[in-house]
Amino acid sequence: MLTFQNPAFLFGLLLLAVPIFLHLIHRTIFRPQKFPSLRFILKGKFPLENKRRLRDLLLLACRLLLLALLIGFLAGPRWTPPEALADSAADQPLHIFFVDASASMSGWDQMEIAREEIRQQLADLEGAPVALLVSADRPLVEIPPTTDYQSIHRALAEAEAVLVQGQHRESLQLAYRWANDFLASPGANIHLHTDRQNASWSPSVLPAAPSGLEWHWHQPVEEPRTNTTILSVRLRPAAEERQEAVVEIRHFGESARQVEAHLHIGDQTITRSLDLLPNQTTRTIIEIDRPTSNRGRLSLEADDYPADDTYHFWAGPTPPVEVTLLDREGLLPSEEAFFLERTLEARSETHWQEFNPTVVPPETFSRENPEQQEVIFLLGTGDQLDDSQWEHLENFVADGGLLLITTGQNPARQNNILRQRDLLNLETIGVASATPRRGNNTIDWINPETALGRLFDEEDARALLLVNLFRHARIRVDPEEATTLLRNRDEEPLLIEKPFHDGRIVYSAIGFDTSWSDLPLSGAFLPLIRETMATNLSEDHGIQRVATHLARTPLARSLQLTPDAPALADLSPDEPQALQIGEQPVEINVPREESDPTPTPLDEIEAALMPRGLSPLTTESEEAHLAAISVSWRPYLLLFAVAFFLMELFFAASGRPTRSPSKNS
């Protein structure tokens, strides 16, 4: 069978009519010439008309064949013997066995069920080409198309689920490349043995498949499946030298369940019986003595998916929060910076987080490492910053930082900068001072819907409500833009907060020194400042959580280390554990994303895998298949074209008239 790679060029054969038409209309025209005398005209012979006509026909034929050969070369003809086509059509289709080996497949005996099903399928194929892909967060086992079934059986026997979240995009793309060589003829099938767990089979990250690939889904365990997992364990201080373990457990199931939880820290082992509601998260508190070990473990009764029934947690101190106090220029820190620094350095037996404050003048602020800053206090110095420093502050808050601003000596100017930079839209009315007639102003209202309202309730609120205000900046703010946390008795806002991208901005209309109020001297100052910052920090702040079997490069990135850092040399990320790397506590546990046994709906996965338009890989596979069983005529056409080009040169040269040398008479 004759086929063409570029059949559109065959329309160029119509150009052959042009030289034929020019040849037919060509006629020799004789023009009479007048001579005064004929005595100088030499005798000559008339050319034979039939010889000239033969040369012209041969020249025309050479040119026509040369043009036809060039057009044929561009069209790319290939000759496929009929017997080769018959042999190709008799080939058997490819069968690719895709085994999901992510963490969730380690439960419910799913890997063993998948192995047995594949063994039975191999026994029924009778010599057809097969391939094997075992996939977790990347391809773990790759056996390209082969007829060596023993290699498939050996790889299956050794394959085990890996305690990592599934990421199958790379593995599916590899399967597509193997299938493309068979899609044109005789076809390709992919058999997926997976539980379609939600986290591993998110339709948004699945690659579209080439056209013609047939899908066969095999789910080892039928729905529904139930599972109970420990989501987190966090320690916080409690009264009388004790601590509390805050435990969160999620039960995936349609019926309630009662389990026993065992908490192990050092030489302490505490058992609690917990009643878990269906499809809900249960939060419980287990009170313990101050632990003698920095490492703890919580375990549940083993269920059908035992990988997430144990949780390793850090029970020791965490790194302090880095706080920058951006103070005015001067030889000594301001009174605001002094009170804040002493407050943040204070240690509390009942507070879970420590702080490391650093006083920084505006001139050196831009040289500070932004990655080390977690909270920034702008102590009335906004009018002393340049554009690059303000841009740094904006990026800091947008990335999740907390910026706490005090009003300063020139509130109108600083607030105008905040408004111009779209950070906080405040209307500044002026500065109000206490008068002998009215007496000192006071804090009159704490927003009950905020963390401050829950902290300063009833008896605890008395210390804050008795604070005397000597002066304060009078401001107005749109309640749709910012939330008021504190107000005075004139219902003027004293403390407001506004979310800004991923972070927060908190603005205080009073300065944190004794010229504005006696707040820095009261017992309410420390809990007010710490609670304002704690809203931006989690109870387990400073603890890095990573998943088991994480590759070294992303593991180093999550710990802010280089992949060749000595601290990672002895680390075994395959084993769940709690440890400390340098000053950084690290918890390594099985990824909890794999704990939800709910499968992704099959129709959503198939919609994501559906081919989008004509797959270029399919066209390439068809060309590769034809190239393997056919012969290209291009080299022969090029050889004949060169031969006819040389002949055309010969006939054209032989037709030129030769001039005889003149003789003198």
Image (spheres, helix red, strand yellow):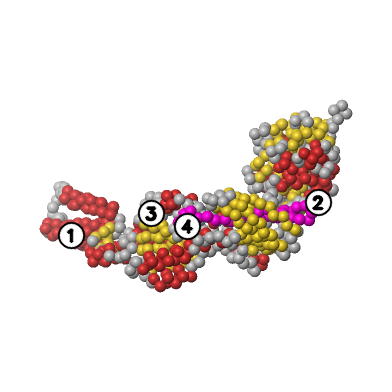
The residues bearing labels 4 and 2 have C-alpha atoms spaced at a distance of 52 Å
Q: Earlier in the sequence, mark 1 or mark 4?
A: 1
Relative to residue 636, is residue 440 drawn left or right? right
Q: Nearer the viewer, mark 3 or mark 1?
A: 3
Relative to residue 440, is residue 618 drawn left or right? left
> In what quadrant of the picture does the C terminus appear?
bottom left
The front one of 244 and 524 is: 244
Q: Which residues are magenta?
A: 221-247
Q: Nearer the viewer, mark 3 or mark 2?
A: 2
Where residue 136 sits in the image (x, y, percent)? 51, 61
Q: Residue 195, labelled with which disc?
A: 4
Task: Report the residue at 54% width, 51% height from top.
Answer: 255
Neighbour tally class for label 2: few under 14, some 14-19, many 20 plus, Cα within 10 Å: few
Q: Residue 548, labelled with which disc?
A: none
The residues bearing labels 1 and 2 have C-alpha atoms spaced at a distance of 108 Å
Q: Nearer the viewer, mark 1 or mark 4?
A: 4
The front one of 251 and 530 is: 251
Where residue 104 sits in the image (x, y, percent)? 52, 59
The residues bearing labels 4 and 3 have C-alpha atoms spaced at a distance of 28 Å
Relative to residue 613, is residue 205 drawn left or right? right
Q: Amino acid at mark 2?
A: Ala
Task: Report the residue at 63% width, 54% height from top.
Answer: 274
Residue located farthest toward the top when viewing the structure as drawn: 437
The residues bearing labels 3 and 1 have C-alpha atoms spaced at a distance of 49 Å
- What residue is shown with label 2? 346
Residue located farthest toward the right when viewing the structure as drawn: 436
When the figure is inspected, residue 626 is found, relative to residue 524, above or below; the finding is below
When the figure is inspected, residue 30 is found, relative to residue 471, above or below; the finding is below
Where residue 574 sits in the image (x, y, percent)? 59, 65
Neighbour tally class for label 1: few under 14, some 14-19, many 20 plus, Cα within 10 Å: some
